Amino acid sequence: MLWDDFSQPILHAHWTPTCIGGGQIAIADATLILSFAAAQQGHYTDAQIDDYTGLPRTRFPWRPPLRMEVRARTSLPAAHIADVSHEHLRGTAGFGFWNYPFSVRGDILMLPEAIWFFYASPPSNMALVPGIPGWGWKAQVVHTLRTEALTALLPTTLAIGWARATGATQTAARWLQRLSGASEVLLTADMTQWHTYALEWRAHQARFWVDDVLVLTVANPPTRPLGFVAWLDNQYAIATPRGVLRFGTVASGPQQLELAFIKIEPLH
C-alpha cells in the first residue's frame, strides 16, 4: 500500500522527480505542486513524479487488483470543445498508470498501455475513440499489447489509406480504436476545483470514479506491470484516422497541477 498526503516538507523517497525546461516541484501546505512559470514552443517543459524510473518494465511496481485515489486540481480550466480561445491549461497533464513506452531520448520503443486520468489541449488530437474529441480531460484506458491488436494492424493500415484517399474516416476510426484498445470518457468536472479521482484496476475490468460517481467501466484492461506517474508538460500529440502522426510542444504562461494525496492499495 502507498499513502502520501505530502505532510512532510520533502518528497517521499518512493517518488522520482523530473523537472525539465523550467518545470518545478514543490510541497506547500501539505500539497504537491507541479508547475512551470512559462513554456516555449519548440522546447519541452515538464514537471512530474513517478515510481518507475530506472526499472525494467517487467519490474514496474503496479498490477491488478488495486485501487488508486488522487485528490487534485489545476490552476487553469480544461479547453472547451466549443471555444478554445479562452484561457485554459495547455499541453498535457494527468495521473495514473502506464508502461512508459519511450526511451530516455524520447524514442518510441513499444506500444502504449495506460490506465489513467489524462488531459490534452489543442492542438493535440489523439482520436482513438469514435465520437469523442481527441483532446480534453478524460478517464482513459489504452491497451495495445494484445493479440487483437496484431490482427487489426493490416485492416487499420488499409482503412487509413482509404480515408486519406477519400476523406471518409468512419471505418478507419473504428479500426484505430481496435488497434489501440482505447476506451475513454470526456469528464465534465471542473479541473480548477478539488476533486477526488479514483480507479479500480482488476484483471477483467477497470472502473473510474470522480467524487464517488462512476464515469467509466472498461472490460479486459492491461494486466502487465505499470508505473505510476503524475505530470504537467507542454507537449501535444496528433494521431488521426487519416494517418496523421505528429508530436510537438506549445507555448504557455504559468500553470500548475496540485495533488493533495495519492493512495494506492491492493484489492482482494
Image (cartoon, rainbow, N blue to C red):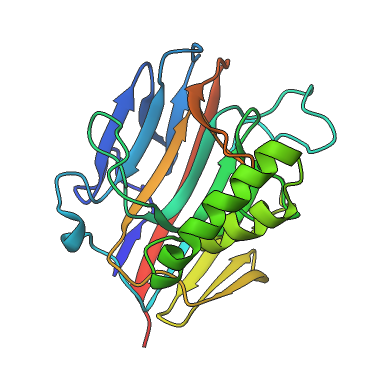
Q: Is residue 256 visible?
A: yes
Apparent side of residue 73 relative to residue 260 in the rendered image (left or right)? right
Q: Quadrant of the C terminus?
A: bottom left
Q: Residue 167 lies in what quarter of the image?
A: top right
Apparent side of residue 128 relative to residue 190 in the rendered image (left or right)? left
Q: Is residue 72 visible?
A: no
Apparent side of residue 51 relative to residue 43 in the rendered image (left or right)? left
Residue 235: x, y in percent? 49, 28
- Furthest toward the bottom, the residue is 268
Residue at image coords 41%, 14%: 43
Task: Depth check: give the residue in front, 171 or 107.
Answer: 171
Residue 210: x, y in percent? 64, 62
Apparent side of residue 166 relative to residue 19 in the rendered image (left or right)? right
Residue at image coords 31%, 47%: 100
Q: Residue 98 lies in what quarter of the image?
A: bottom left
Task: Depth check: give the residue in front, 183 or 137.
Answer: 183
Residue 230: x, y in percent? 41, 45
In the depicted structure, whether residue 98 falls above or below residue 220: above
Residue at image coords 31%, 71%: 63
- Furthest toward the right, the residue is 82
Residue 228: x, y in percent? 34, 54
